[in-house]
Amino acid sequence: MNDFCFVHAADLHLGSPFAGLIAQSDEAASVVASAPAQALDALVRLCQDRSAAFLVLAGDVFDSPSVGIRPQYQLYSALSSLADMGIPSFVACGNHDPMGSWRSPFNWSDAVHFFGPEVEWVPVHRRAPQGDVEPIALVGGISYPRAEVFDNLALGFARNATPPRAAAGSGAGTCLRVGVLHCNVGGVAEHDNYAPCTIDDLCALDLDYWALGHVHQHRVLIPPGEGRPVAVYPGCTQGRNPRETGPRGCCVVHVSQGRVAHVEFVPLDTVRWTAFDLDITDLAGMDQLLDTLTQRCAVEAAEASRDALAVRVRLVGRGALHRELARMGPVELGTWLRDGLQDEAQARGQWWWLESVKAATRPPIDTAALAQSGGLVAELLAEADRLAADDGSLAELASCLQQEFNHPRVRAVLESISPGDWRDLVGEAEALALDLLLDGEGGAGA
């Protein structure tokens, strides 16, 4: 059997609403909302360029059970194009798009297979160079019948065991066996624990490759060459929020002699989410701040080989700009930097969107010297350091504030603040207190 490759993708989330961006900018919402469909187009081109034997989509192709006609047509058009190229596709439904929650109004090609609520196996054939049709793979998968599935669906692969290798036809002894499963392996905390299973569950079956979905970060759980089934999360094809930074895409799985030889991650995202800190310590004016931000975004875009960036920035450090940033406030600062950055990007033929900017700067003072000077300022610095260094003290602070502001909405906000955010708030309170205490003494404005 000749070597071949197939493409494994998951979590396309077509039809994502991006409601938060609409409040900021119609343009930003439009650019980011179109990105998942553009990633799908890139996926089709990749399958064509690599002459993929087949495509696997491991769940959450759509973002919502109530998906509209447009995202459905995007998928129909993409998979129909692949079918016309002779590339079959296999689709599992996940928790965002369980089967039965959306009804396709299109006549799908026979080369497009949607898995049902029970594990089923489908052979993939390819014409050999000598003209014979040969089996190269058995693809098995299962779809979510409803949005919340807490059963171990991996066990379904054991109940519906792969057919004998010879069942796929002559030469099936070297057929690759691929399992398609939308699940949470090992209880990844960042994702709902749907279809939970373990590495041992995956290794207990006579498969060669687990095409997984649900976890949005690319992860190789079991790499090739270990004598176990290779298990991979490709991650989402397009980052959808500031938490989904870095490259997003799919995996090209290279097969040799019926076994997985190599798994290649290929970025597909058209809008790259990025987040970074920007130090103001050596910046003398707001023009330098914009220049520094522009230079950093240019580097990010070049390293990502992307023309579109969605950026989250945190301003840090002690410097002369601290007081000006505090005077401007978050709204004016964000608007000014956002407009300036867009102009700079446009001049370069690119699109950079400042999703948010947070000023966590400090006044340009020698806190080490003040901490040794005694008095109220030294006590303030010592207390701020104590709070920031101890999660228990931060929890106590949160509890005191919840009692002080005994209102359900305020309490809900306070309960949602993480220890890291509490440390930032303590730092901001320290900076404000120092500004007020040292105002007129030359410390804060130096």
Image (tube, rainbow, N blue to C red):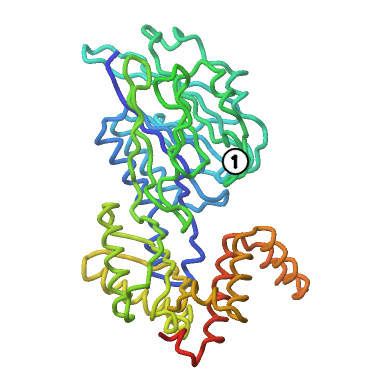
Residue at 37% from the left image edge and 6% from the top image edge: 170
Camera-nearest residue between 279 and 147:
279
- According to the image, label 1 marks what residue? 100
Please, what secondary structure does the residue beneath circle 1 have? loop
Residue at 42% from the left image edge and 70% from the top image edge: 317
Displayed quadrant of residue 254: top left
Would residue 24 appear left or right of 394 to someone viewing this image? left
Residue at 57% from the left image edge and 33% from the top image edge: 185
Q: Where does the image place residue 263, in percent across and percent down from the top left?
A: 36, 30
Camera-nearest residue between 306 and 7:
306
Residue at 31% from the left image edge and 75% from the top image edge: 290
The number of discs equals 1
Mark 1: few, some, or many residues within 10 Å (few <14, many ≥20)?
few
* Above/below status of 24 relative to 95: below
**Quadrant including the N terminus:** top left
- Residue type of the residue flagged with mark 1: Gly
**Quadrant including the C terminus:** bottom left
**Of all residues shown, which one is farthest toward the front?**
373
Camera-nearest residue between 7 and 223:
223
* Above/below status of 336 relative to 385: below
Would residue 191 appear left or right of 409 to someone viewing this image? left
Q: Where does the image place residue 248, in percent across and percent down from the top left?
A: 39, 46
Q: Where does the image place residue 385, in percent across and percent down from the top left?
A: 59, 66
